[in-house]
Structure formats: structure tokens, C-alpha cells
Image (cartoon, grey):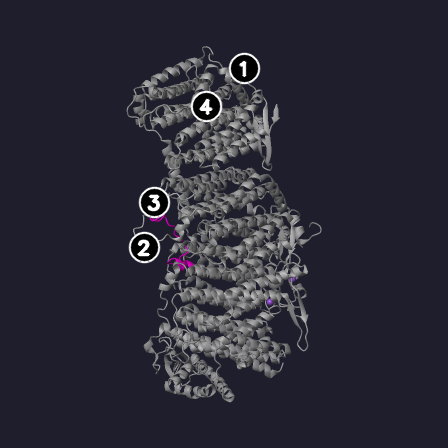
Amino acid sequence: MPDIAELLITIFIVLGGAFGLIGSFGLIKLRDTMQRLHGPTKAVTLGIGSVLIASMIYSYAIEGHFSFHEFLITLFMFLTAPITANFIAKAYITRKVAKRELPETGSDYGWSIYDDPPIVENEEQT
Amino acid sequence: MTVVDNTLIIIALLPFIGALVPGIMIRAGRNASAFFTAVPTALALTMLLLHAPAVLSGEVITAEIEWLPQLGLTAAFFLDGLGLMFAAMILGVGLLITLYARFYLSGDDPMGQFYTYLLLFQGAMLGIVLSDNILLLLIFWELTSLSSFLLIGYWKHLPEGRQGARMALAVTGAGGLAMIGGMLILGNIVGSYNLSDILASGEAIRASEWYLPALILILLGAFTKSAQFPFHFWLPHAMAAPTPVSAYLHSATMVKAGVFLMARMWPALAGTDAWFYIVTGVGLITMILGALIALFKDDLKALLAYSTVSHLGLLTMLLGFGTPIAAVAAVFHILNHLTFKAALFMTAGIIDHEAHTRDIKRLGGLRKLMPVTFIIGTFAALSMAGIPLFNGFLSKEMMLEEAAHTDWAGNPYAVPILATIGALLSVAYSFRFIVHVFFGPVRDNYPSKPHDPPFGMWAAPALLVLAVVLIGLMPHLAEPVVRAAAGAVTGGVLPEFHLKIWHGVTPALYMSGVAVLGGAILLTLHAPLDRLWLRTPRPEAKVIFDRLMAAAVGLSRRITEITHDGSMSRYLAIFVAATTVMGYVAWSGSGLPLPSRELLPIPPLVFVGWICILLATVSVALMHRQRFRALVVIGVIGLTISVGFVYLSAPDLALTQISVETVTIMLLLLALHFLPKTTPIESSVPRRIRDGVIALAAGGGVAALSYTFLLRDMPSISEYHLANSYKGGGGTNVVNVILVDFRGYDTYGEIIVLGIAGLIIFALMEALLNGPAARKLRNADYSQDRSRDRHPLMMVIATRVMMPVAIMVGVYIFLRGHNQPGGGFVAGLVISIALLMQYMASGFAWTLRRQQIEYHSMIGSGVVIAGLTGAGAWLGGKPFLTSGFDYFHIPPIEEFELATAMLFDLGVFLAVLGAVMLMLYSLSRIARYAGETVNIEPMDYDPSKQVVMDEKEK
Amino acid sequence: MEIVIASTVGTLTAAGIYLILRLRAFAIILGLALLSYAVNIFLFASGRLAINMPPILNPYGDAAYTDPLPQALVLTAIVISFGMTAVLVMVALGAFLESDDDRIDIEEPATEGPEQGTGKGEAGAS
Amino acid sequence: MNHWIIAPVVLPALLAPLIGFVMRHDVPLARTASVAGTLALMAIAVGLFVMSMGDPQVYYLGDWPAPFGIVLVLDRLSALMVLLTTVLAFIVLIHAIATGWDARGWHFHALFQFQLMGIIGAFLTGDIFNLFVFFEILLIASYGLMIHSGGRERMRAGLQYVVINLAGSTLFLFALGVLYASTGTLNMADLAVRMQEVPEGEAALVRVAAMLLMIVFALKAALFPIQFWLPGTYANAPAPVAALFAIMTKVGAYSILRIHTLIFGPGIEATHGLPGTWLFPAAIVTIAIGALGVLGARRLMPLIAFSVLGSMGTLMVAISAFTPVATTAALYYLVHSTFSAAALFLMADLVITRRQSDWLSARPATVQNGLFAALFFAAAIAMAGMPPLSGFLGKLLVLDALRDPGIIGWAWSAVLIGSLVTIVGFARAGSLLFWKSTSIAVDLPPAPDTGEDAPAPSAAEIAARRPVGVAEVAPTMAALAVLGAITIFAGPLTSFLDGTTAQLFDREGYVTSVLKLETEG
Amino acid sequence: MITAALIFAFACFGIGALFCLWRIILGPDSADRVLALDTMVINMIGTLVLYGIWQGTAVYFEASMLIAMVGFVSTVAYCRFILRGDIIE
Amino acid sequence: MIRRLIPHPLLSIMLTLVWFGLVNKFTLGNLLLGAALGIIIPVLTAPYWPNRPKLGRPLSVIKYALIVLWDIIVANVQVAWIILFKRNANMRSCWITVPLELTSPEAITVLAGTITMTPGTVSAMLAADSRAILVHCLHSDNPEADRDRIKQRYERLLQEIFE
Ligand code: NA
Ligand code: NA
């Protein structure tokens, strides 16, 4: 086993674990929900990313074949994390944040959970 | 001595066959109905009488057909003296009743029905007296209860008729059921249900330890049927029936069935102390009690009914004596009672029919208005009173004679005195019948001015009275019949006897004299005694019976409604508790082999998973009231279990678990949208503790069970599956090969379950949307406090990339399932989840409109493809679901495998996908019904389009 | 490990049973879901536990495999219970929409409605 | 291999999706297909019945040898049950079509065919897990049929029915887990072999399995103390469905009979005496509950449902003896009670449609009061076990078979008193429904003053006034005719059942046939 | 060395999962629970990937991928429920 | 015609790559199968993606990707630092509104995603007319600066790529 590969693997695994733990710790430590949202969306995602990189290096260096698998999971994570965060934020705002606590949108319409979208033609009702 | 003659069967069946005819011609009119009733009766009677000479000379005629040999039930009939006498009575009186009823009933009554019932009843009675198999006898016995129920309730608009019918059925039915028990015991003792065998085994029966229970059970049947104390009360209420019915059932036939049975079973059961004391005792009490009540009844039919009770008691008492000569007396009295009592009932019927009342207190003086009726009624009543020159006298003398010689527990006076009292009362009520009805001044306030009825109506009683007088004057005429019948009762041996008018001066003559004199005196004192009687508090049997009945119904209802009150949680609690207890009982009946497996270690991460799942589970139980919250926590459990499956070498399970879990949560969320969001606290603390205890006990039991087997090894058939998966099934994923091949039949069943689920959900949705729920849905406002963005832009965009990728993943999982974790089921769920993503992004309606596939067809084709793949094996002569596979190599592509199992798996895939989507579709249709708007754009607002429009506007 | 599985099955069963003894359909659905988890693990465990021995045949060697049969049975059971749960949810929803609550108990009408017949009957009398 | 054995499962399994998914908008076509399919099923069942006369025939699905694949076993008992199912199904189907029940909701015929598939599959299978699968098929189909056409009461009763059966299914899986964990096999014949090898002192697990399975089946058979679900379910199901359900309780009884003779049979030391000991008292109490329910009923459908419960009690009393004689009696009674329950429910449907109420109260007499009274009378005496119909013979057979001094008192008292109470209850009901009703004048609606104000009669009212046609009453009559036939031909039927019982108790024969053993052991 | 790193990472993800459990059970807000569940899913995926390295097999890959996919879908569904009540409309 | 056969060429390529990621083995058979699926699946899902987004300047795409990747790493270190060492009392969280020039939904989505994945910010929601984005900052001493950074660093590049 090449030492450099082992070292890299070790580093990425340790980093991954650390970021994962810190992100989760944020859930406990931070005071309000919006703050807590920051931890998982970033730290934990990066943690997983590190672990996946470790896994890829591992299969290439130690098992001798290149693995694309991990890319897929990474793709999923990066595609979904912002959407998830967005939804959770809205879910929180709709329940716990008063409209006036938020800044103005600066346009004619308010924020999307409070205001209907501009009326487009052909909207139909059943 | 025994002659086989199958015409006996025809005789027994004729009434039943005849019953069909009036039943069919229900509207044919009185004459036709009566005629077609008379024909089979007369035919049967004729055929019977053709056998009479042989039977009277001591032959026994038999016939039998196999019916249920395993049970010892044969359709066996025999005709001996007793049977002949009874059969002739049944048919003969039946004929007279047919004639009488033709005139008695009005044109408005459904005659066809009446005659059908009558013939059914006649057939049942005939069956009883001709049966040579006690099981067959039981069948006819119960049939008499049923057909008499119909006859008594014939005037169904009268409450008395309905109640009387039900009472009769309850009492005689109960007795009948007891008798079944008794008869079965008899059969057990003897080893045969053949009556002849049983009658021949009297010794063995009486010696058996089961004798007493059998005796009591059989007597219960006989006593209830023959209205013996304390079951006598039903008979008077059965008088609500039309008079022809009363005359037939309650004088001649049905009530005599009990007496017949005692006579029939006499050789087998009589002659013991138990028999004597029970039968004689009950008979005596009934005789006196019936007579006493009869004396004070003002309703003619009630008077006659109680007199019947009394006479039945007399007969019972005679049979109870257990001596042959008493048996002779009983048989003779049966015959005599038949003649005078039927005539009396018909007389009462005529009076009722003409005067429109049966109340003695409103009658009197009919002697002049209805001379013919007067003669008939008086002669019959005198016979009933036991006045010389009438037949009643003869048999009563014999009875008194026998009573005079009977000791009761060493006391020589008790029975004679009581018998005399009975006779005395009998004289009194008979005289009352004559004096208070026919004598005295003619009234001017009869409800209807009475006069003698047409000939057709009085012909029948006249004929009977003729017999009364004839036998009374020339008793030797009846002797052959009585001799033959009594011989049958006693089993053949009879002492020397002759029926004659004058026996000389015997104790019986004195007793008879006392009775007549006393009776006359009693009648003169009737008015003051009647007032005394009315003032005397006494238990009214009907009231007691009604109360008992009401109490029984009420109690049943209470028990039923308390236990089956729709309380599901209690049902389940009982179910779980019972299962736990029974499981423990089964468990504790044996031991276990020694543990044979080493424990696996618990690494820290497993420990974490353990904590997760335990805490999550407990918290679901504790905070299930917050429904949404509980669903989130359920997610933790599902997730942990999936990961656990991965750890425990079950990747297929993990895939399935997590995807099913997700879809299930979707369904629950969709449903929760309509349901209340919280569960109120409804159960008390003790109840929750109770439930907790049950739950912990069951959970503990399950834990103990699993721990027990986890520590022990066992040899499994799956060695074979591991060995043959690749060779015989063409796949390396053994779990998948088991699913689609070794146990493909299970999987076939499983997708059918899903298909059915889809169907049900669709059907249910349609039912809901077309039912009252629809209104509720339309009026409900689900839009409160809702976020305004329904189809957020970001989600829509992300989905456009995610969904194709997810579909790709689904295809991948499908294609590799045979060799690696995956397969049609998981693939179906993954694709459903992919589509679900699209639905969540742009809404169901928008997505559905752009969809080419119809979910109904998808389920159907999935199930059919799987089925046809299985059936395809038939083409090769192989059994259903036999798979085939092969490896192909088309250069330059690497070798690949094709297997029929994949086609089967495709069926699975389609069924799963279709079912899940149909479920979602149905739920979303309900939601749309609740007034939700449908979007025509994929996202709420597309800013790029707006720019284009803005530009156009410019 | 065995104690983990046994206690998990036991706890899930107990919680599931406690929930199915509640009075509302939704709690019962939750309870049945927990019971279904419990029984799936139980049935799975009947093949005994094995770590890293998935029953995927390995062409290269003489590997040990866990018992695949219970896994197949559990898969069948999971699918069936999914179908059942779906129907249950729909029936519960239907029952809720047809009546006014999602109670599981049924209160029998004590008497025939006034608009229907006399209702008195001959109750106990014969 | 005889491919016909699988036919009664595959035919409805292929037909049902076609009906449900292709013909779902064409009621006449769906009806035709359903009737044709059921007729074909009946023909197949008759064929199988004839074929079943020899040794058990085994169908090795997927061509895998036993005990590794799934097998179907056609023996006299399974053939009888399949035949019974198809005949009943045909009768019920005609009723459902003639009365229009099938069109009162979606997918009746598809569910009906699936229901048949499930029931028949359960009777034919020789694999215990497959039995579970087919139990689930028949159950889920029955959920759909139970709530067919919806309505408040039916939905709520349906929900309870679903819940209790899901609990039962869970228990079934627990039982199978224990069974597999202790034997490592699923094939019934193989289980029978392995059960013989379980040492008596190490049988705790298999005893639990035997007991749990018995409870599962007892739940289906509606035995005390898990009978609570039955009255509510049957009373609220659409009447033809309730009639079809008459066979569903029998699936439970059949399974107990099969499993607890073959696997945990009388000769097995490990579970010796376990099933009978508990079944017997439970069955006795069930009879009592049924009888009380009949006597105390306020409505017709519950009354019939409770009478079905009582008949299950009687059946299970006979089964609990686990002797050949009692089993023959039980099988006879099983056939009888299936059709008498069906006759009652079908009759009730006709009556309730016309009375527009199933309350046992006096309402104006309906059209054809006499006809209904006659049907009721016939079906009631059959169910209560009065002569001349088969109920009486069945009861005699059962009583005659139960002569063990330890149980005779309880068994006889329960059966006899139970039928007395039942007949009194039926008499009370019949007298209210058909006799007292004639004393109430039909109150015709007042003549309309203006044509507009008069409300048009509802569909239900129109149906109520219409006399029944031949097609509507024929199924009820047919069920009664079957009862008549099994009464008259009780002898031949019972000797067939004797053979069936002998085969059922011949464990070695079954095992040898399934496992293809050349010599015994 | 890798083994030690793996053990460290296992511990991290395990403790992380427990933190998530804490939030899931105690909330306080529904959004917190959903967030914590989502995070727990990610932790589990990490654990599975690590376990794949530990055992040197790719058999567990599908499970991780599928968990990632369905984790996202269920998170969105939970949020949509909070936001709109109806998760597909 | 081609537009109907291959409605989203980039998606097709991506799916083919995804297929390799799934099978994890490069063979000719897999290439053919992957390509076939990569063509078929977008055709099947095309109805749900009616328009084809314009995507220009591949170089800008790579530049943007690198910037974001770097920012993600930085963001994580920052956030980790804050979580571990900043006292809650000193945390100054705030909401900011970022007005948008972008009109392409794809671009807006990418921007919002970027905001979430990068230092101390989470995009919470859009305005109803998608002309502004609401951002939550975990800790910000100067909210205006954060808003400008987002507009300068990401939005401009995205405008180049998508419009
Ligand atoms: Na497969
Ligand atoms: Na095969």
C-alpha cells in the first residue's frame, strides 16, 4: 500500500468525521433553528464529501480499480442540500417567524410564503 | 313375525308429498285445498288399514332405507300395534279435521298455507309413531315442534297466536333437545340407534350408569311435549290457534306424542324406582293441577286445554305405574280421550263460530238453540266425566283400579286418594261444561244469535261421539286394538284382561262413585269457589314465562352489547393478553436445548443505533398525540432499521425497507392532511397502565423468544438455496433468486396483494367522492395558515435533474437485482419516488396531464405479465413459474444473461409502480376535491417567462 | 448483538401494542407500523445474525453466507404490509370523512331511529 | 405433474386484473367474465375433486423439489374445500349481480375473483409461509369487499376489521418466525417430519409456534376470546359479501385442522394435547356467545352474524377433539354451516332491501311476505340445527362423535342449549319480521296535492316496493337446495368425508407424497 | 492508521447521530426535527460509506445511494406538510 | 426532430456518466446501455422539462465551479469555527435581502444553492416574483458587505453563464 495514499485516506476520513461531528454538534449548541440550519447544510455535507473522497482513493489505491460510485452520492448531496435547507427554512419561518421580522423584498411582491405570485394568464381553478 | 313391506315408507312420506300440493295452489280456494289435503291422508289411512289385520294378529311390518350409516341413522320404519293405533288416530282425526277446517276457517284465511302446515304436522306425527330408529324419531319429533309452531302462529296478526307459538316452540323445543341428549346416550349404551334393538336391551339400559341421565333427558322431552307439570303452561296458550288446530294438536296428536314416547320406551326404561316416582309423581300432580285449573276457566277452549293437561297427567301416571295392566288402561284411555276430547274441541269451535264467544259466563241455554251441538257436546263431556255407558268411564275405572293397588313409598292411600280427587275434579269441570253452556235460560245478549252449524261442520264431532258411545256400550270392539297396542307397549306379554262395562263391585267403583257425587257437589258450589279462586294469589305461568323470557332476552342483549360494544381497543387488548398468556402456557410446558451459538459483539456504533431505535420507539409511544412529530420519529426508526439490515448482511432488506418506509410516510402525510393533527387524551390513567402492562408483557415475550432462538443453531433448508441459486436459478443474489424463482409463487401473491390494494384504494376514493364525505371535503377549509408558495421554483429546477437520475437509478437497480442487491420491487419503489419528486415539485395535476401511462393498466399488466411468465413454463411441460435463463455473447459486447425471472421481475416492477402511483393519485384526487386549485405552469412563477411577456407588452 | 436485536424487537412490539390499544385510528396506524418493524426484524432474526456475510454469491471464493431465506420472507412480508398499510390508511381516512372523528370504537345505535318504524318491537315478550 | 392443480389459482389471478383494469368501465362485460370465470372455476374444482380420490397429489412450483420450493397439495380435504368455495362463490355472485350489489361501487368483480384466488390458494398450499401469503391475499380482497359501496357504518366496521386482521397477520409472522427459527423449514410435510424429531423436553419454541398459529387461525375462525370482530364485520358487510365470508371463517377452521393434524398432530410428543385442550373451552364459550347474541339481537344482520359465530363454535368443538370420527362430523358441519350462513345472509339482503331497515321491529309487511317468511324459516332451522335440514344431522354427528367422558357434559350441553337458544332467537325475530308485520297497515304516502311537491321515490324506495325476481331469489334457494342435498345424500357425503378424514390423519401418506420418499421414515 | 481513522470517524458520526436524535425527540420546533432527521440521514450515509471501506466491499453502496435519495424526498415531504398540509397538490 | 429525440443533450451526457457511476465498471456493453438510457429517459421526462435552458461560456462554468468549491471549503471551516468556539451570546445572526438581476430559474436555483453552501449564509426563500432572495447569515458584522459579495462573486458570473 503506498504510504501517501494511506495518509490521504486517513486525513480525509478524519476530516470527514470531524466535520460530520461538528455539524451535528451545531444542532445541539446553536440557539435558534435558523442558526442550527447552518451546521448540517455545510459541515456535514463536507464531511460526507471527505469520506467519499477517502473511499474513492481507497478503492483506487488499495483495491486497484477506479470507483465512480462516490461521485453519484456526492452529486445527490450537493444537489439536494440547498433545496432541503430552503424548505426547512421556509417551514421554520412559516411557523415561528413573524412577517415583520423579515426584511422587505424591495419589490412589489412580498416573500413567497406570504404572497401569491404575480398572476399569470390562464391560471385555472377547479 | 316381522314382515318387510316398503309401502310403509310411502305411508310415512305421503303427508309430506301431499304438503307440496296445497302449498303450490295457495290461492285455489277452500274446497280444492281441503280436497287435496284429504286425498293423501285418506290414501295413507287406507294403506295403513290394509296392514291392520296383520298387525293386529301380532305381526310387525318394517321397512328401511339407508341414510347416514356412519351415524347409525337409517330411515327405518316399523308398524306394530302401538304404532298402528296412533297412526290410525293421526290419520283418521286428520281427515276429520280437514273436513272441519274447511267449514271453520273463513275464506279470507290462506287455506293453502293452513293445509300445508297441517300435512307437514301430520307427516311429522306419523313419522314419530312409525320410526324404528330413535334418531329418525328425533327428527320427526323436532318437526312436530316446528310445524306446530307454524300452526299455532297461523293467525299471525294476533299477538296471542305469535306468543303462544313461540312459547310452545321454546318449551317443546327445549324438551326435544334434552331428548336428543337422552336418545344419544341410549344409543351409546346399546350400541345402536335402532329402536327395536333398544327395546330389546331394557335390562342393559336399566343397569347402565347412564340410565338415570338418559331417563331424565328423555322424560324431559316427553313431559314438555305432553304438557306435564311444570311444563304444562304452554298448552293453554297454544289455544290461540284456530280450533281445528287445537282439536288436532292438543287433543289427538301432538300432546300425545309425549305419552306415545313413554309408552314406546316403556320396555327399555320402565320398571325402575326412578321411573315410577318421576313419571307417576309428575302425572299425578299434573292430573290434579290441570283439573283444578280447568274447573275455574271460563274460556271453553282453556277449560278443555286444562282438562287435556289433566288427562295427559292421568295417562302419564298410568304409564308410571309400570304394570302391564296399567299400560292397557293407558292405551285404552288414549283412544277414549281422543274421541271425546276431539269432539269437545270441535263443539267448542262450533259454539265460538256461531255465538262468537267462548266465554262460559256469556253462554248458557244453548240446549234449545243448538240441539245437535248440545247432544254431541254433552255426550262427549259425560264421557270425559267418566259416566257409565260412555267410553271414558271404562278407562277411568281401570285407572282407579290400578291406583287403588299402588303404594307410594310404602303408603297405600296416597295414590288412590289423589286419583280420586283428580277424578272428582274432572267430573266437576265436565259437568260445568254441560250445565253452564247448554242449560239454564236462553240469553238475549249473545254476541251473535247461535244456531246449529251446517252438517259439514258437525259431521266430524258427531262421528267421534258415535265412537264414544259405541265403545262405551261395546268395549270389546276396541279390544283387539288395545290388546295389540298394549302388547307393543309392554313388549309382548300381557296378563289376561277383557274390556267390559261391569267389573263387579271393586274399590274403583267406590272411588268412581265418590268422584261423581263430589264433582256434582263441587259444581253447585262453583260460584263461591270461583270467587275464592279469583282472590287466591297464584303464580301465573305465562307471566312467569314471559318474565323469564324477557329476562333472558334482556340479559343476552346486555351481555352481547356489553361484550360486543364496538370497543376495538378492548378487543385488541383481550387478543394480545390472551395471546401472551397462551404463548406463555405453551412455552412453560417444555424446555430448551442448550445454547449453541456464540454471542456476537456489540460495537459502539451498534450501541448508538440501539439507543437511537429504543429512544425513538419509546418516544413514538409517549408522544404519539402529536401526530406529525410521531411521523418524523418513525422516520428515525425506519432509517436505523435499514442501516441495521445493511450491517447484518441484508442489503436487499435495507433497500426495500428504506424505500417502503419513505412511500409509507408519504401516504401517512397525505392522509394526515385531512385528519386531526393531534390525538386528544381520552383514556384514563388506569387504562393506560393496563395497556402498558399488556404491551410490556407481550413485548417481553417476543424479546425472550427471539433471544432464545438467537442463541441456538438449527439446520435450515436454505443450504440448498445457496447451493443452487447460481446453478439452477441463474443469479448470484440468493435472496432475489429465492424471491423470483424458488419462492416466486410467494412473490406472485405479494404483487397481487399490492394490485388489490391499488384497486381498493381507487374504489374507496370513488365511493368517498360520491358519498356524503364529498360534501364535507368541499366545505372543509384546508387552506388556513398555509404558505403561499406551492410549487417553488428551486424545487422544480432541482427535480428536473434529479428525477431522470433517480429513474436511471431505478433502472439500474432493476437490471442488476438478480445478481446484486436490488430487483423489481425496489426498482418500482425508486421510480415511484422519482415520480413523487416530480409531483411534489409541480403538483399532481400538472404532472399527470403530461403523463402517458395509466396506473390501472400498469398494475394490471404487471400482474398479468408475472402470471403469464409463470404460465409460460407450461409450454415446456414444466410447472408454473419454472424459470429459464441463458448467457449470451454478442461481440464486442461482453457476455450477459437473460432470464425469464427478469420478465417475472418486470411484472413485479410494474405492479409495484402502478399500485404506489394509483394510491398517490387517489389521495391527491381527494385533496383536489377539497377545493384546491390546479396549476397549469410547472412552477408558481417563472421570472424568465415574465420578461418575455413584459417585452411583448412594450 | 443478540440482546440488541431481542430488546429492539421487544421494545418495538411493546410500543406498537400500546399504540394499537389507543382509541384513535392514527395511533393505531402508528402502532401497526411499529409492529410491522418488530415482526420484520423478528422474522429476519429467525435466520440468526451474521455480520458481513450478505447472501450474494462470490465467484472468487468459498465465502460464508448468512441464511437468505428469512430475508426473502421478510421482503415478502414488508411488501405485503406496505399494501395493507396503504389500504388501512385509506380506510381510516374514509371512515374519518364519513363520520366526524377518527375514533376506532363504534357506538351502536341503541334504538331504531324515530323515523323508522315503531321500534318498540315485542322485545322480551313472547 | 397435474397442471390442473394450479389452475384454480391462476385462472382468477389472470382474470381479475383483466376485469379490474381492462373491463372496469363495462359492467355487463365484467359480469359476464366474472360469471364465466366462476363457472370455469367450479368446473375445475369438480375435476380436481374427482382427481383427489387417490393419494395426495403434489405440484412442485418452479420445478424445485420439496421442501425447497413451494408445493401445492391436492388431497381430498383441499379438493373438498375448493369445491365448496366455488359453489358458494357462484351462488353469491349470481345474487350480487341480480340484486345489483356489484354495481354499487368499483371493482366488485375483480376483488371477488382475487378473493377466490386467495381462498383457493390457501386451501391448496403445502407451504406454511405461502399459507400466510394467501391469507393476506384473501384478507386484503375481503377488506375491499367489506367496504364495497361505502357508507358510514360500513367504513367504521371495515376499519375495525382491517385493524384486527392486521394484528392477526402480525401474529402470524411472529409464529412463522418462531417456527422457522426452531425448524429451519417451511414446507408443511418437512415440518411434520422435523416435528417428530423434536425431543419432548426441548420443545418450548415449537410449542409456542403451535400455539401462536392456533391463535392466528382461531382469530379467522372467530373463536372466543378473539371473536369480537365477527359480528360487527358481518353485520355491516354488504350482504352477498357476508355470505361469501361464510367460507372465510372456514379457512381458519381448515388451517387448524390441517396444521394441527399434520404438523402438530395427535401423535407428536412435543405439542401433545396442546391444541385441543385450549380449543375446546374456547369453542364452548363461542357457542354460548353466538346463542346469546342471536337471542338478544335487535337487528337482523347481527342476529345472523351471531348465529354464524355459534356455528363456528359448534364446528370447533368437533375439531378440537382431533379424532377421525369427530373430524368427519366437523367436515359435514362445515359444509352445512357454510351454506346455511350464506342462505341466511342472502335472504336477509332481499328482506332488508324491502323493509329498508334491518331492525327487528314490526314494520308494514313487505311484498311477498310469505315467500320471505318461508325462506327465513328454512334458513333459520338449518342454522339452528333443527330438522329436516342438514343442521340437525350435522349436530347429531357432532354430538355422537364427542363421547369422551371428560368433555361430553360440556360439549352436549353447549351444543344442545345453544341450538335451543338460537331457535328461540330466530323464532322471535321471524315472528317480528314476518308475522307481526302483517298486523300493521301499510301507510301509503298521502296523495300528492300538486305534482311538484311530491317527492319522487328514492331508488331504495323503488327497490323496496319491487317484488323479487327469479334471479334474485334463486341463489338463496340454491343455497337451501344444497342444504337439502347434503341432507338427503348425507350417507354418501359422510363416507366421502370418512375417506377425507382418514387421509388427513395419515400423516405418513402426506409426507411420503410430498417429499417423494420411497419408503417411510 | 486507516483503521484508527475509521474508528475515530465512526465515533464522530455515531455521536453526531445521537445529537440528531436529541433534536428529533426534543425539538423544539417541527423544523428542527426535520432538520435533525435530515442530518441523521447524512450521518448514516457517512457511516455506511465508512463501513464499506472497513469491510472492503461495495455491496453497501446502493443502500447509501438510496438512503440519500429517499432522505431528500422525505425531508421535502415533511417540510411541504408543514408548509402546505398537502405534500402533492 | 433531433430536439425531440434528444431534448436535453447535457442531461443525456450526464445520465450516461451517472450510469457508469452506478455500474462502476467501464465496458462497451455498459456504454451502449448507458447511452441508450441516457437518450430514452430524457425523452420520457421531457414533458416535465418543457424548455431547454440556455447555457453559455463553458469556461465561466468551470471558473464558477472552482470558486464555489473553494468557498465551500472555506465556508465549512468558518462555520466549524463558529460552532465550536463562538459563544452564542456573541453570535450576530441576521436576515438580508439580496435583490436579483437573474431571471432564469436555473440561474436563480444555482445562486440560491451557492449561497447556502458558502460562508455563513443560507438562502431561505425567494420573493413571490422571484426578484429577491432572502438570506440568513449565521454571523455577520456587516450585512451589506455580505449582500454585495453575493452579487459580485456569484450573480455576475451566473448572468454570464445563463444569459
Ligand atoms: Na431481479
Ligand atoms: Na425455477
Does the magenta segment cover residue C110? Answer: yes
Which numbered mark, 3 or 4, is in the foreground of this view?
Answer: 3
Which numbered mark, 4 or 1, is in the foreground of this view?
Answer: 4
| Amino acid marked by disc 3 | Asp
Name the N-terminal-most of marks 4 and 1.
4
Of residues B459 and C56, the one drawn nearer to the viewer in this rendering: B459
Of residues B870 and B191, the one drawn nearer to the viewer in this rendering: B870
For residue E1, what is the image quadrant? bottom right
Relative to B952, does residue B619 appear above or below in the rendering?
A: above
Q: Which mark is residue D443?
A: 3
Discs 1 and 3 share one subunit: no
Q: Which mark is residue B338?
A: 4
Q: Which mark is residue D452?
A: 2
Which numbered mark, 2 or 1, is in the foreground of this view?
Answer: 2
Q: Is residue F88 left or right of residue D173?
A: left
Name the N-terminal-most of marks 3 and 2.
3
Crowd around label 4: few <14 · some 14–19 · many ≥20 (10 Å): many
Q: Magenta stretch?
A: C94-120
Q: Picture coordinates of residue B317 (x, y %)?
A: 46, 23
Q: Chain of mark 4?
A: B
Image region (quadrant) for ligand 2: bottom right
Crowd around label 3: few <14 · some 14–19 · many ≥20 (10 Å): few
Discs 4 and 1 share one subunit: yes
| Amino acid marked by disc 1 | Glu
CA distance for labels 3 and 4: 46 Å
| Amino acid marked by disc 2 | Glu
Relative to F17, does residue B634 appear above or below in the rendering?
A: above
Q: Is residue B364 left or right of residue A9?
A: left
Q: Which mark is residue B496?
A: 1
